Image (cartoon, helix red, strand yellow):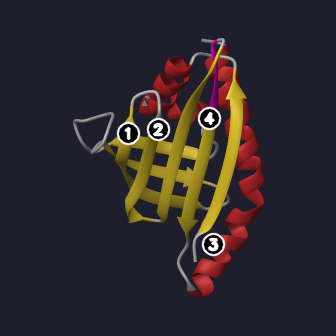
Amino acid sequence: MASVVEHSLEIDAPVGVVFSYVDDFTRTKEWLYGLHRIEPVTDQLSGVGATYEGVMKVGISLTSRLECTAWEKDRYIEITSVEGIQNTQRWTFTDLGDDRCRVEAWISYALPGGPAGRAMAAAVKPFIGVAVRHTSEHLARNVEAL
C-alpha cells in the first residue's frame, strides 16, 4: 500500500528561478531532506528520460533508480522510480505574480510488505514530518537567497 505526502509552499522568487533550482540535480542535496547521494546514470541531465541513482537516509538507507517521466519548463517535474523503493514525486510550480511562486509537492512511496516492510515503515515514519518541514524551509531559503 502506498503512502502519500503532499505539501505546498510559497516562495519569494520568480517561478523560472525556482523551477531551475529544483530541476538542477547538482543542487538537490542542498534542500531535499535525507538525500545522501544522487548521481546521473544517463547523459541527459534534465527533462523526460533523465535518470539518476539516489540514496535517501531517513532512519534507514533507501536506494532507488529514478527517471524523469514528465517535465514542462516552469510548470512541473515528475520523477518515478524504475528500480528499488517504489516512489513518485511530482513538483508543480505556479507563477503568483510579483516575483512569487507556489511549489506543490506530491510524493507517493511504497515500502516492501511483510515483517521487513513493517520494520522499514516504522523506521521511516518519524522522519516524514521533519523531512517535509526541512525540505520546504531549505528550498525557500536557498532560492530566495539566489
Residue closest to the far front: 97
Q: Earlier in the sequence, mark 3 or mark 1?
A: 1
Dividing the picture into quadrants, the one containing residue 60 is: bottom right
Q: Secondary structure at mark 4?
A: strand
* 114 drawn magenta: no
Stretch in magenta = 99-103
Front residue of 91/43: it is: 91
As shown in the figure, which amino acid type bears the numbered disc 2?
A: Tyr
Instruction: Say whether marks 2 and 1 touch (CB < 8 Å).
Output: yes
How far apart marks 4 and 3 lie (CA) works out to: 29 Å
55 vs 103, left or right, is left
Residue that badge 2 annotates:
76
Residue flagged by tag 4: what amino acid is it?
Val
- Answer left or right for 101 relative to 83: right
**What is the x, y in percent for residue 71?**
37, 39
| Whole-number angstrom distance, CA of label 3 to CA of label 2 | 30 Å
At 55% from the left and 72% from the top, the residue drawn is 111
- Secondary structure, mark 1, is strand
